[in-house]
Image (spheres, coloured by chain):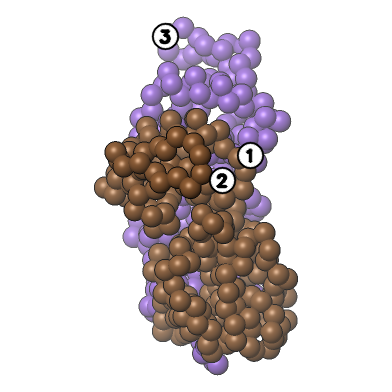
Chain colours: A brown, B purple
Amino acid sequence: MPAIQNIKVAVDAVVFGYTSKEGLSVLLIKRDVKPFRDEWALPGGLVGDDESLEDAIQRELKEETGIGINYLEQLYSFGQPGRDPRNRVISITYYGLVKPDAFELQANTDANDVAWYNIKKVPQLAFDHQQIIVVARERLKNKILYQPVGFELLEEKFPFSELEKLYMAVLDRPIDRRNFKKKVLKFGFLEETTEKQLLDGAGRPGNLFRFNEQKYFQLKKEGISFEI
Amino acid sequence: MPAIQNIKVAVDAVVFGYTSKEGLSVLLIKRDVKPFRDEWALPGGLVGDDESLEDAIQRELKEETGIGINYLEQLYSFGQPGRDPRNRVISITYYGLVKPDAFELQANTDANDVAWYNIKKVPQLAFDHQQIIVVARERLKNKILYQPVGFELLEEKFPFSELEKLYMAVLDRPIDRRNFKKKVLKFGFLEETTEKQLLDGAGRPGNLFRFNEQKYFQLKKEGISFEI
């Protein structure tokens, strides 16, 4: 066991955003400090000696992006020597999925800009942050197969097609729509209302759906097994 | 962002063992250093400045327990201030499931003893290691629902009941045996041989099974959805 250690600990967050119009995006900041000054990166920074990892990532998000998210999950710890050109820094990363409209962005401290980037148009990033996003994306894809998703992302009432679009955006592939609907309704976390969808174009208007809040959070806790 | 940081980084491992006779166990060491001297704990220690997290946990396992395991997975990072009475130490933890018979235990460096403890008879542990085992146990339970398990744990050929016992030990609950067998055979990672089981007692001897190696590792990579 080494008697002296020269390693620093950081936290970084992959905050995914979803809107039915823009699809999946990720929250990035432009660095106002060296190294990689003026390059895009994930929000994050060093952990304070007396703060928990969760408090540290909340503080960094608030400082660098202006937003507060209290339901991030730990993703993975990245610790390869050399991942930071200054000295050894281990990053403990977090991820979450939110509704971008709910937040007002405001860059500060180590960031001079902050923006949502469509997941397919992410610029070159500082450090190994590109790789961290890849890992977070995979975790998110897996997560929606064992937990219901959408409660905080969709309107209170929505056409069923909105839920399909959300799952296709996160999974990044088409789904078997008939099977998908059958399974979702069987889980019971969604209920059909008698209200009709307002349509811009042609087609038969379907009923709107809403989440059954109690069932949704019960299944989120217990876990589901969603083969799509 | 704090300019100076006084946090150390450790790695710790939850190595689960499985035998059909003893069930599920966990590998513990008796500490030969302060704090918690002579108390049982998970093997682990501080990360060297130039070694990867994976190399660090391999080295610690080798030093403290004598064993080498190259297929540990990262579990979670525990960083609550106060979890170590000396100073702030963040532990990046790993877990794995192995066959205890394959290893010869040998305590050294920071450990003066090493042993497998049945998961239901774990003694009081140093630090927050009890909590780390709880998290690892939950992760293992979930893992066997999306990845086949048993290849490295069972004999080359085995009665089907051995696989049932393994799953029941990890899940810590009974399973619907008929359904379980139907699903396992449908996945195709197991194949029935024409050899018969040797029975000690009464009962009709069933055929022995073996893993279809190619299918097993393919499904391990792709993932399954195993509702048991």
Q: Chain of mark 3?
A: B
Q: Nearer the viewer, residue B161 or A41?
A: A41
Judge depth for marks 2 and 3 and give the one in front.
2
Q: Amino acid at mark 1?
A: Glu
Residue A152 seen by the camera = yes
Q: Is residue A79 above or below residue A151?
A: below
Q: Nearer the viewer, residue A22 or A52?
A: A22
Locate residue A108 relative to residue A72 in the image: left or right: right
What is the crowding at mark 3: few (fewer than 14 residues within 10 Å), some, or many (at least 20)? few
The quarter of the rendered structure image containing the N terminus of chain A is: bottom right
Q: Chain of mark 2?
A: A
Residue that badge 1 annotates: B222
Same-chain check, marks 1 and 3: yes
Locate residue B175 relative to residue A31 in the image: left or right: left
**Which residue, as the protein is rendered here, is positioned at the far bottom?**
B3
Say what secondary structure mark 2 lies in: helix
* Gap in angstroms between the C-alphas marked 1 and 2: 19 Å
**Which residue, as the protein is rendered here, is positioned at the far left?**
A214
* Gap in angstroms between the C-alphas marked 1 and 3: 40 Å
Judge depth for marks 1 and 2 and give the one in front.
2
Say what secondary structure mark 1 lies in: helix
Residue B202 numbered tag: 3
Horizontal and vertical percent position of residue A159:
42, 44
CB atoms of marks 2 and 3 within 8 Å: no
Q: Chain of mark 1?
A: B
Residue B83 numbered tag: none
Residue A168 numbered tag: 2
Q: Amino acid at mark 3?
A: Ala
Residue B66 seen by the camera = no
What is the crowding at mark 1: few (fewer than 14 residues within 10 Å), some, or many (at least 20)? few
Judge depth for marks 1 and 3 and give the one in front.
1
Residue found 33% across the figure and 46% down from its top: A210
